[in-house]
Image (cartoon, coloured by chain):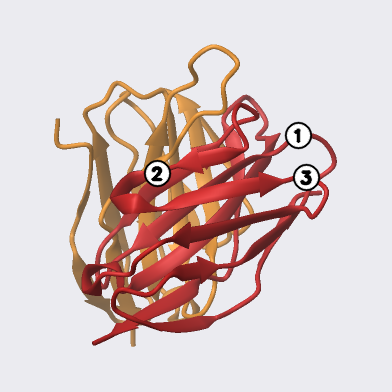
Amino acid sequence: AQSVTQLDSHVSVSEGTPVLLRCNYSSSYSPSLFWYVQHPNKGLQLLLKYTSAATLVKGINGFEAEFKKSETSFHLTKPSAHMSDAAEYFCVVSEEELTGGGNKLTFGTGTQLKVEL
Amino acid sequence: NAGVTQTPKFRILKIGQSMTLQCTQDMNHNYMYWYRQDPGMGLKLIYYSVGAGITDKGEVPNGYNVSRSTTEDFPLRLELAAPSQTSVYFCASSIRQGGITDTQYFGPGTRLTVL
């Protein structure tokens, strides 16, 4: 069964400093992994996606994530935080298929990123 | 493309009332999904559809119904609203391309309060 754990419910950084949002997953085979961002009162936007190609995945807005199978981790990083990065971030694992097709997504509980001046 | 659109954005219902949450996508995606998001939790799948005329239950289907008469539309129906259905509802769509895991694209959400 697939599952995902986001290790921090809240992260606070200063503008211009690095961001690290941690995610560990559990799956039986080879999962696909996603990071989504949700700005206040908005829908979810895809940041980046890993699907068994390069282990270092680059996404939008300067974010990237590294798939580490030995550590079952998929941490999200950004070298320099911007005020506009303040949002909630969800790590998502997809390995299982739904009956009839489509992918079953399992969401983490989210990490709220606060960026201070 | 507008992507995935949802209406209404906000709604307050009384216990026992019914309503339909609308979802439309203009990307010609065959898969569509309904999720709910409760405070401090990730999204939970309510129902999904793999194509027009085909729907199936997700993790938390009780109290909801869906239909899929066209590729574009996937409405979610609440028949007898209960306070436990207070949540934010997201619709999503995706398309399978070869053997690659499809990416789900989400609408902006409907915030529903049942009093």
| Same subunit, tags 3 and 2 | yes
Q: Chain of mark 2?
A: A
SS at circle 1: loop
Query: Within the image, what quadrant is residue B62 found in?
Result: bottom right
Image position, residue A47 (x, y; %): 39, 49
Q: Residues within 10 Å of mark 3 (few under 14, many from 20)?
A: few
Left or right of B17 in this view: A48: right
Dot label at residue A69: 3
Q: Going 22% across and 69% down the picture, which residue do you hit? A: A84
**Which residue occupies the foreground of this view, B16 or B25?**
B25
Q: Going 41% across and 23% down the picture, which residue do you hit? A: B30
Q: Which chain is orange?
A: B
Q: Amino acid at mark 2?
A: Gly
Q: Amino acid at mark 1?
A: Ser
Q: Chain of mark 1?
A: A
Q: Residues within 10 Å of mark 2 (few under 14, many from 20)?
A: some
Q: Going 30% across and 82% down the picture, which residue do you hit? A: B14
Q: Amino acid at mark 3?
A: Lys
Q: Which chain is red?
A: A
Q: Chain of mark 3?
A: A
Label 2 and label 1: CA atoms lie apart by 20 Å
**Which residue does the numbered mark 2 point to in the structure image?**
A59
**Which residue occupies the foreground of this view, A61 or A36?**
A61
SS at circle 3: loop
Screen quadrant of the N terminus of chain B:
top left
**Which residue does the numbered mark 1 point to in the structure image?**
A30
Label 3 and label 2: CA atoms lie apart by 19 Å
Dot label at residue B20: none
